[in-house]
Amino acid sequence: MSDSQDSKETDRKRTATVSRQTAETEIELTLAIDGEGEADVETGIGFYDHMLESFAKHGLFDLEVDCAGDLSIDDHHTVEDVAIVLGEAFAEALGGKKGTTRFADRTVPLDEAVASVVLDVSGRPVCEFDGEFSQGSVGEFTSVMATHFARSLATSAGLTLHVSVAGENAHHEIEALFKALARALDDATQVDDRRTDTPSTKGEL
């Protein structure tokens, strides 16, 4: 790739708009990686909206999500499909990942709870999860769907992701997880001014 092409890759605006329509959900999502933490989210699940807004705020991502899902059944398809679309948006917005930091590690507490996220924007989707949630649900959000969110995001964004949670309150545990994931993704997607190539000996991610 020429120097001018390298410059275009590292200087371009890292944004994406992704739509997904199935028999279970209809989603429109817009992401700006280099944002200000602004969020406009409507999924029909109040706690999920709160988590996605927190994700945007703490990652300094601008995020718009409009999801109409089959909530008369349960929250599964809505949580999963939004995570899939969010991951696709990250993958599209990052492009070839030239100049990015790639790796990150964040631990975030919330009162008695703590969550840790170690990730690699590797293009190889893996999610290892350690821990469990202290209550079965928070509002209309099923707690184990936080694990599924992480796995679905890792799969569609191409992340190697290691997550752990501990605590006594599921609200705190899940919120710490979303905040740690946001901070780690913010760190890993930062552009390192010393690097203009793809951070891999293979030459691509």
Image (spheres, rainbow, N blue to C red):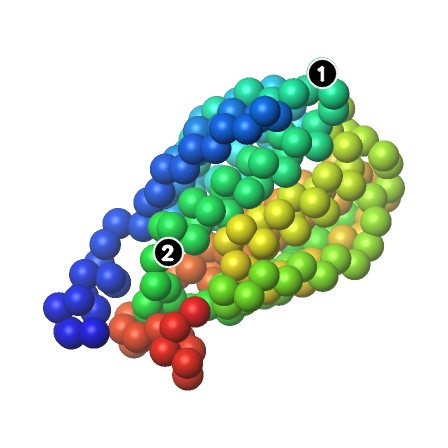
- The relative height of residue 126 versus residue 31 in the rendered view (above or below) is below
Q: Nearer the viewer, residue 157 or 15?
A: 157
Q: Position of residue 176 (x, y in %)?
A: 67, 46
Mark number displayed over residue 72: 1
Quadrant location of the N terminus? bottom left
Quadrant of residue 38 within the rendered picture: top left
Q: Is residue 162 left or right of residue 32?
A: right
Q: Position of residue 58 (x, y in %)?
A: 51, 45
Secondary element at tag 1: loop
- The relative height of residue 68 versus residue 35 in the rendered view (above or below) is above
Mark number displayed over residue 94: 2
Q: Is residue 186 visible?
A: yes
Q: Is residue 4 left or right of residue 172?
A: left
Residue placed at 74% from the left, 57% from the top?
129
Residue type pointed to by label 1: Ser
Q: Residues within 10 Å of mark 2 (few under 14, many from 20)?
A: many
